[in-house]
Image (cartoon, rainbow, N blue to C red):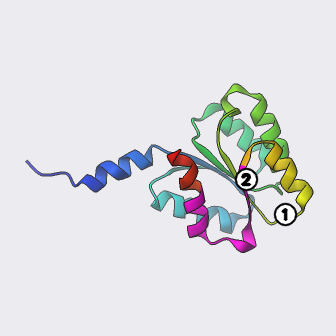
Amino acid sequence: MTDTPQTNQESNRESQSVILIVEDDPVLLKMYTEKFGFEGFKVLNAKDGEEALKLSLVEKIDIILLDIMLPRMSGTDYLARFRQNEKGKNVPVVALTNLAEEEEKQKALKLGVKEYLVKAMQTPEKVVETIKKYIRS
């Protein structure tokens, strides 16, 4: 018999967490997909709000990392529609955007965004830590 290291069980527990990354910048999408994959998350991607809405209504999602400025449907429009569905009522969402306007921030927070992060002020490590905070709770 071979012993299974405890770390496998820990990473299996974490790998149960599914994150939907909604980001239209291919470089950032790839970077965050790899980063969260490395951290043990199952990662789903959407490049715009419409794609995010379709995915989030059929997949089991534990948390969403959401850009606000997106083609076809903005992040806040997507979130407003997702929140109307039973599946979307309690999914934690963290906004990660270049949009620093207070009006957009307030709109997102009213839709239940846990945190509103400005991309220029974040490192991938900080974003992962922020996301993990809401997965644990």
Label for residue 99? 1
Left or right side of 127 for 69: right
Amino acid at the residue labelled 1: Leu
Q: Which residue is drawn at 92% across and 55% down?
A: 103
Can residue 71 be spotted in the picture?
no
Q: Residue at x 64, y 39 (%)?
A: 91
What range of the chain is rendered magenta?
Answer: 114-130
Can residue 132 be spotted in the picture?
yes
The image quadrant of residue 100 is bottom right
Name the residue nearer the viewer: 49 or 6. Answer: 6
Left or right side of 79 for 32: left
Answer few, some or many: residues within 10 Å of disc 1's Cα (few below 14, many 20 plus, some between 14 and 19).
some
Label for residue 47? 2
Answer few, some or many: residues within 10 Å of disc 2's Cα (few below 14, many 20 plus, some between 14 and 19).
some
Left or right side of 42 for 3: left
The image quadrant of residue 128 is bottom right
Secondary element under disc 1, as helix, strand or loop, is loop
